[in-house]
Amino acid sequence: MHRIRILAAVSVATLLAGCQTTGTVQQNAGGAYVGLQHAEVVLERDILVPAGQARVFVQGGEPVSAAGLSGAFDSYRPHCAFEIGSVDHGGRPISAGVFKVVRVEPTIVPVVSAAPLQVAWSGGFVGGGSQSYYDGYHFWLTSDTDRDVRRMTCYGVYAEPYELYPPTIGDINAALGTVARLKYR
């Protein structure tokens, strides 16, 4: 029994190691994949993280609020979010500068449904749960000038699993517009 557990643990670890990201992102739809091992995110201007929040969204080249309070966030267009390590502030600027990409991780996020809970009946399951997702990347960042900036996360469009795809570098740079750009070699 002990050997089976060890074998199972080794098998799972091997599978997970094979799933780790290689740091590549597709340039454009149908285009080649590019390695981002030495990439940088160049923040062209200061942006403000709203009070009590840990991130600021950027879409269509402008900071927007996911709650729709300032700017019109559109779930059906690619977007990015700059994330800091704290929510304990009264509104914190992220200063323009260069952030080195130290790691790229793929991420898929289910969007929680606000629909009432539904239950299973004999003969099948009825409703409930998430039907749509965001597919994207976490770009883990480091900087000599602003150590509180943790990462930039970029997602493609909100979609059902069969329509889901992560953003390309072209999508990411279009979402960032003149606020920032993902620069790679």
Image: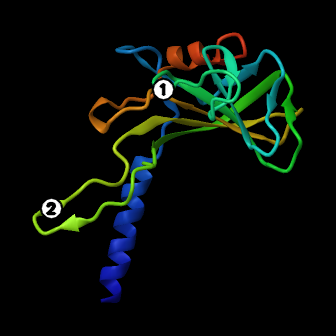
Residue 59 appears at what percent x and percent y?
61, 20
Q: Is residue 117 left or right of residue 182?
A: left
Could you say which is closer to the camera, residue 145 or residue 54?
54
Residue tagged 2: 124
Q: Please, what is the three-letter code of the amino acid marked with disc 1?
A: Val
Give the residue at x 45% y 24%: 76
Crowd rating for badge 1 (residues with CA inside 10 Å; few <14, some 14–19, many 20+)? many
Could you say which is closer to the camera, residue 133 or residue 123?
123
Residue 24 appears at what percent x and percent y?
49, 29
Residues at marks 2 and 1 touching, judged by CB atoms closer than 8 Å: no
Quadrant hosting residue 122: bottom left
Q: Residue furthest front?
A: 116
Q: Is residue 9 left or right of residue 105?
A: left
Q: Please, what is the three-letter code of the amino acid marked with disc 2?
A: Gly
Give the residue at x 47% y 16%: 27
Q: Residue furthest bottom?
A: 1
Residue 171 appears at what percent x and percent y?
51, 17
Crowd rating for badge 2 (residues with CA inside 10 Å; few <14, some 14–19, many 20+)? few
Say above or below: 174 vs 50: above
Label 2 element class: strand
